[in-house]
Amino acid sequence: MSDISGQSILRVENLSQSFLSGTQILHVLQNISLHVEAGEIVGLLGPSGSGKSTLLHAAGLLERPKSGKVWINDRECLSLSDRARTKVRREKIGFVYQFHHLLPEFSALDNVAMPMLIAGISQRQAKEEADRLLGVMGLSDRIQHQPAQLSGGEQQRVAIARALANKPSVLLADEPTGNLDPTTSATVFQSLFDLVRIEGVAALVATHNMSLTAYMDRVLTLQGGRTVANKPR
């Protein structure tokens, strides 16, 4: 694990979000505060519609909340310009979604290398790093396979490796195993757990799968727009 473990990388302070629904205001998030340390996985539980995705979008600087602050590496980010927030997203945040969104015409290796190539890293370095990440994810023998030649679990492991390709400080995952069967889900999440520990990123993972809480360091449940801390494992 990274030697920066114990340092709060992601901090959300008093974050609130609401939307107009017809003539009524729907308060989705109310004064949410949380933190995630380096090398830590914090689970975010709650049924559909509880605000998990909204919270991840705000923490990932994809949308502006009505109020609150988001700190990444001790830098308050919501007050930044659109251009500066985009730069933080590109360099400091990795995203994993329920659907892998891999490029179908490229190999697993090329899919993981692509973000690094876009960032200006040389092809040799990008492919070496992609090969390393895929190895950690248990896919060393699948690196030249295209997505259609991979199982659903393998595709999602490629997506996780891609999310960490540019060495982000924060990993945000929204139902990363939502489309997988229980056995595959456990395999994928074990790989995610291992990679978070090795890379030392701060991971916030939204899921409704209670069995995955065994992998979490802490679990928060969203209820009525607020977080309730669960007992640490």
Image (spheres, grey):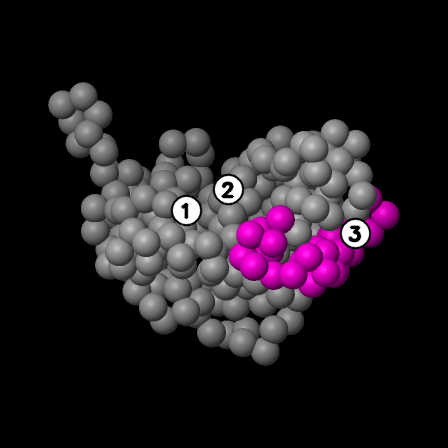
Q: Are marks 1 and 2 in contact (CB under 8 Å)?
A: yes
- Dot 3 alpha-carbon crowd within 10 angstroms: few under 14, some 14 to 19, many 20 or more: some
Would you say 80 lies left or right of 227 here?
left
Q: Position of residue 230 (x, y in %)?
A: 46, 54
Which residues lie in the magenta part? 114-142
156 or 14: nearer the viewer: 156
- Residue at image coords 66%, 49%: 112
First in residue order: circle 1 vs circle 2: 1
Looking at the rendered structure, the kind of residue marked 2 is: Asp
- Residue at image coords 51%, 48%: 95
In this picture, is 29 found above or below 203? above
Looking at the rendered structure, the kind of residue marked 3 is: Gly
In this picture, is 92 found above or below 55? below
Looking at the rendered structure, the kind of residue marked 1 is: Leu
Provide the residue designation for mark 2: 174
Provide the residue designation for mark 1: 56
Q: How far is mark 1 from mark 2, CA to CA?
A: 7 Å
Q: Is residue 1 covered in magenta?
A: no
